Image (cartoon, helix red, strand yellow):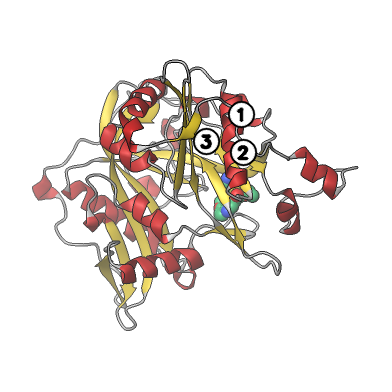
Amino acid sequence: KRHKFWETQPVGQYKDVGDFTLIEGPIEPPTPLSDVKQEPYNLPAAYEWTTCDMDSQETCDEVYLLLMNNYVEDDENMFRFNYSKEFLRWALRVPGYYRSWHIGVRAKASKKLVAFITGVPARIRVNDEVVKMAEVNFLCVHKKLRSKRLAPVLIKEVTRRVHLENIWQAAYTAGVVLPTPITTCQYWHRSLNPKKLIDVGFSRLGARMTMSRTIKLYKLPGSTVTPGFRKMELRDVPAVTRLLRNYLSQFVVAPDFDEHDVQHWLIPRDNVVDSYLVESPENHDITDFCSFYTLPSSILGNQAHSTLKAAYSYYNVSTKTPLPQLMNDALIVAKQKDFDVFNALDIMHNESFLKDLKFGPGDGQLHYYLYNYRVRSGMKPSELGLVLL
Ligand SMILES: CCOC(=O)c1cnc2ccc(OC)cc2c1SCCC#N
């Protein structure tokens, strides 16, 4: 497939795949800041750039509504992601964030927000190199403005603003194949509310299965089973940081989290992120950790249900409790919190519990990309330790 825009960018090109003479690392060197374009890229005349201050209730509402009505849908247009406002503030106001990287496009006449793209700073380790990157996310163009070639301008503008902060690499994901994924992951889904998933048409009754038999199949205990399993608290940040850093060190690509990062990303926030750990009853060591984030979706075109309450597996570490048992406790908590489905990618060690815990493979794939950084090709999802929201 032709990628007019991506063939002009410093990303792995299809012709490079399998070329083992290419070494891992930046594709292009940094340019002197004086050579970075100082003014924004040109938009079509009727539109203007705007910086979205997520601290402003009004602006946060506009971003929320733009995404709620125009962001990513599945291939069958059954669902559309419905990121909440508190989730967006969590995802965007990260330690060391730049407000200038929260980029909007408004129609000059109406001042309506019609497009959005964001970057947040992150330290990502690739093999033995820790690289300052931008995690680029929430690229969204209003449905009425599609095919005006706005997306390439948004991508060039966020790239320009990232360059102005002397950062030359980025990480991003997409459901579509672009030049060139570092790895491709599979979504897996564990029904928590099978009746609702059948009502909306996502799941179908199995052959020779009644609804009550299906509900029984996915039934979970009313409470968690692991002794010492409890919610994470602020006092746990140092121990969880140690546990997580050690665990993530085994993956080819993973975040280089410090205690500030752990505090931001993993301290529980209602309706945004849930984190649990196992504190050994004998010696109070923290031996295991699991977490999931809350990302509802609008259910499109269904009379009975309007919203799908979905939990997404985030970072999980098991050093004592078997991972399937730890994750089953996560399922139990998610069911207690009335989630309809628990989703997970086949990254890290997730494959070790997906089938046992009755996850089913989704038909969607998630491709991971690095901008201006070459990774030795052939990376497996199990070598990936990075979850992007
Ligand atoms: C019931 C299982 O499917 C989803 O949870 C879901 C929900 N909303 C979406 C919105 C846009 C969308 O676009 C790809 C997919 C979904 C999906 S499936 C892929 C995410 C996961 N797991």
Amino acid at dot 2: Ile
User: Is residue 364 something that shows in the picture?
Assistant: no
- Marks 1 and 3, the one that precedes in the sequence: 3
- Mark 1 vs 2: CB contact within 8 A: yes
Amino acid at dot 3: Thr
Query: Which quadrant of the figure has residue 192?
Result: top right
- Marks 3 and 2, the one that precedes in the sequence: 3
Disc marking residue 225 = 1
Amino acid at dot 1: Val
- Marks 1 and 2, the one that precedes in the sequence: 1
User: Residue at horizontal 17%, vertical 47%?
Assistant: 165
Q: Is the residue 106 above or below the residue 52 in the image?
A: below
Q: How far apart are marks 3 and 2 (CA)?
A: 29 Å
Q: In x, y percent, where is residue 104?
A: 31, 65
Query: Which quadrant of the figure has residue 334?
Result: top right
Q: Is the residue 209 above or below the residue 118 in the image?
A: above
User: Is residue 40 something that shows in the picture?
Assistant: yes
| Residue underneath mark 3 | 184
Q: Which of 190 and 114 is in front in this view?
A: 190
Q: Nearer the viewer, residue 128 or 154?
A: 128
| Residue underneath mark 2 | 332
User: Residue at horizontal 32%, vertical 39%?
Assistant: 263
Helix, strand or loop status at disc 2: helix
Q: In x, y percent, where is residue 160?
A: 23, 52
User: Residue at horizontal 36%, vertical 51%?
Assistant: 90
Q: Nearer the viewer, residue 304 or 120?
A: 304
